[in-house]
Image: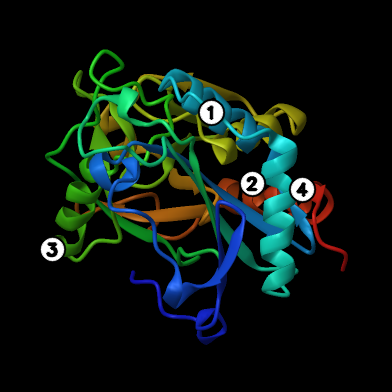
Amino acid sequence: MLQKFDERNRDLIVNLNGQLIHRDKAGISPFDSAVQGGDAVWEGLRLYRGRIFKLQEHLDRLHRSATALSFAEIPPREKIIEEIKRTLAANEMQDGVHIRLTLTRGVKITSGMDPRLNQSGSTLIILAEHKAPVYTKTGLTLITSKFRRPSPEILDCKIHHANLLNSILAKIEANNAGADDALMLDTRGFVAETNATNIFIVRKNDVATSRAVACPEGITRATVLEICAAAEITYLETDLKLEDVYRANEVFCTGTMGELAGVGKVDDRVIGNGEVGAMTTRLSDLYAKRTATEGVQVVEV
């Protein structure tokens, strides 16, 4: 599974601290904290027919993450939303768009780790691309990574930070194994997430997902739990063993970039009948109904 270049993105206009600039001319300072140490937080947003789904929830998480990292300056959400609108308007975008929102600690007066060297405010980057959900709808193949997701006392997963090397190493393992993504365990040996998404299993008619101990509190994950509650589908947040995944009737992943994606195989073990199951399909349909009607209007369609 490798994303392909979309020709519509060749002349993208990106937003760097309010400056709208062609993608080929965009750049941040080598003294920016994102370059110096991955010192940044981010969100992935999706635009559906002029509306951004769960925008306020994403901005809440961005603010919580930046606060946890003691950013001295966090732009007001009204400012962020206005810059998102300007970026979408500059690219004439209305639908089928993924927005990468990055907030760094900003530019340092000299190279170094100390946050006191950041004295000019944060850097806000808005990248909007034409991008359909990235995962196949016919069933993903996962392998279990040897790399573990860190525990909160090492690096709290509730901070949606831009230091993604742990996940990138797992993704390299998946690539080398010919799999789509890697399943990652926590330091206790329980299932945390994949290198890019939250994970769910279906046992008979019940849905279960990992506790948010070593995985982010995903916005799509939370939406699926909301849908389960509304549809009276029994669900559980619990510690999942790898054996629970192997024995599941269905497995699916969730995330803004890929929405809901069924899993057909994990570590050469076929899940269920190897196809996307009925519960995954049902939840995907209910999720699509929400994205078709909910969200914050940012573009007139």
Marks 4/2: CA–CA distance? 11 Å
State the SS at label 4.
Answer: helix
Q: Position of residue 106 (x, y in %)?
A: 41, 39
Compared with 43, 139 (above or below) is: below
Apparent side of residue 4 relative to residue 205 in the rendered image (left or right): left
State the residue position of label 4.
Answer: 290
State the residue position of label 2.
Answer: 283
Marks 4/3: CA–CA distance? 36 Å
Apparent side of residue 145 relative to residue 40 in the rendered image (left or right): left
Residue occupying the far front of the picture: 109
What amino acid type is highlighted by mark number 4? Arg
| Nearest to N terminus: mark 4 or mark 3 | 3
Q: Mark number for residue 73?
A: 1
Give the crowd class for mark 1: few <14, some 14-19, many >=20 residues within 10 Å: some
In this orientation, does residue 27 appear? yes
State the residue position of label 3.
Answer: 176
| Nearest to N terminus: mark 3 or mark 1 | 1
Give the crowd class for mark 3: few <14, some 14-19, many >=20 residues within 10 Å: few
The residue sitting at 44% across, 19% down in the picture is 68
The image quadrant that residue 74 belongs to is top right
